[in-house]
Structures are given as structure tokens and as C-alpha cells.
Amino acid sequence: DTGVSQNPRHKITKRGQNVTFRCDPISEHNRLYWYRQTLGQGPEFLTYFQNEAQLEKSRLLSDRFSAERPKGSFSTLEIQRTEQGDSAMYLCASSLYQNTEAFFGQGTRLTVV
Amino acid sequence: GENVEQHPSTLSVQEGDSAVIKCTYSDSASNYFPWYKQELGKGPQLIIDIRSNVGEKKDQRIAVTLNKTAKHFSLHITETQPEDSAVYFCAAVTFSGAGSYQLTFGKGTKLSVIP
């Protein structure tokens, strides 16, 4: 499968715990994006990388959230001190540099209890 | 920032009929408009897109139209089939001179095709 891969698919965690998600983009894609989707809503932009550089962050990305993309390949999204309001689907997408089509992964569904 | 409105929020059609979903956007600088289909438990899948220099694009049973003056774009699905049932999202993309790129999504339309 050469699509965008996200792990884990599901994560249940207790409030206050830290969680980390991983995204493996399509191999030749330079750009990588993180989105959050809550029930009944469209995906909301969180942040994006061009290669290893994090170029833009949404105001939705509080200081409890951090994203990295070491070496410009896979990316991780960490949420510290999780809150119930963090429960959502976290989506990763990638696209070619100077190309606009963004392809999404299956997402990681986070439930904070 | 960009704001995308999508209507209707739910749509039921008989198999074989056509379905139309409409979106409006606010930022005149937006120049790329993709449509995504999302099935339950899955990520959004790109089904068709249109750029600002084109007024219409068609791919088999799916077509998109764009009216830049009115800032609205539409998705048309003809000869609907039960497997078309899903949530459809429109999106608008604005590129800045610094290379910034952001997809802004509508809230989605749940399409149900009744056999």
C-alpha cells in the first residue's frame, strides 16, 4: 500500500496522559499536514510541514500539542496532558511540492476518558 | 481567513437520480477547490478538483463547476448508485507568496442513495 499511513488507528487514553500519533506520508511527497476532525464537522487545519520545516501552525494547536517531522519523512503529533475536548479524529495528509492534491490517511481516532 | 459554507447538510436521492452539493467561499484569493468523499471510519478521499482558471470539469459521473465571480462551486453526481452514499466535503485552498497552503473545508453533506 503506497498511500498515507497512520498509526495507531484508535487510541483510548485517560485524561492527563500524553499520546503520540505517527504518520507516514506517500514517499515522494514533500508536504505533510495534520488536521483534526470532530463528529459532524469537516477537517480543521492544525499544522503543515515542507520537508522537515514546520511552516504554519493553526491557533487550534495549543502549547500542549507538538508536531515533528525529523528528516522530512514520517511525522509525529504529540498531545500532552490530554483533555476530553481533545477527543477527535486526527488526520494526516501529504502532497507533492508545488502540487496541490492532498491525499489523506485513514486517521487516528482519539478518545479521552 | 477563508470560510467555506456547504449545503445541504443531508441529501437523500433515489438510485439513478442526480445529486447536487453547493459550496460558497469567502476569500477571493482561493484558487483551488477539491472535493473529498469520506466513508464511515475512513479518511477523506479526493474524488475531483477544479482550479480557478477552469469553469467546469467532468470525470465520468462526477462533475464540478466553479463561478469565481459569485465565489461558489458545485459537485454534480449523475446516475447515483448506493456506493455513492457517504459524506462529501468541499474545500478551498489559498496559496500565499510565502508558500503557505491551507485547505479550508465545508461542514460536509451526508448523501444517502436509496436503492
Image (cartoon, coloured by chain):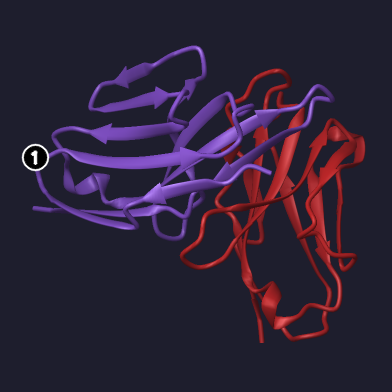
Name of the residue lying farthest toward the front: B69
* Count of number-bearing discs: 1
Determine crowd level at label 1: few under 14, some 14-19, many 20+ residues with C-alpha closer than 10 A: some
Q: Pick the residue in front: A95 or A71.
A: A95
Q: Pick the residue in front: A59 or A90.
A: A59
Palette colour of chain B: purple
**In this rendering, does residue A105 appear at all?**
yes
Q: Is residue A50 left or right of residue A90?
A: right
Q: For residue A96, which quarter of the picture?
A: top right
Residue shown at 36%/53% (left/top)? B109
Q: For residue B81, which quarter of the picture?
A: top left
Q: Which residue is mark 1?
A: B16
Looking at numbered disc 1 in the image, what kind of residue is underneath it?
A: Gly
Residue B8: give x, y in percent of width and height: 31, 53
Chain seen in red: A
Q: Pick the residue in front: B75 or B46.
A: B75
**In this rendering, does residue B38 appear at all?**
no
Question: Label 1's element?
Answer: loop
Residue B68: give x, y in percent of width and height: 47, 23
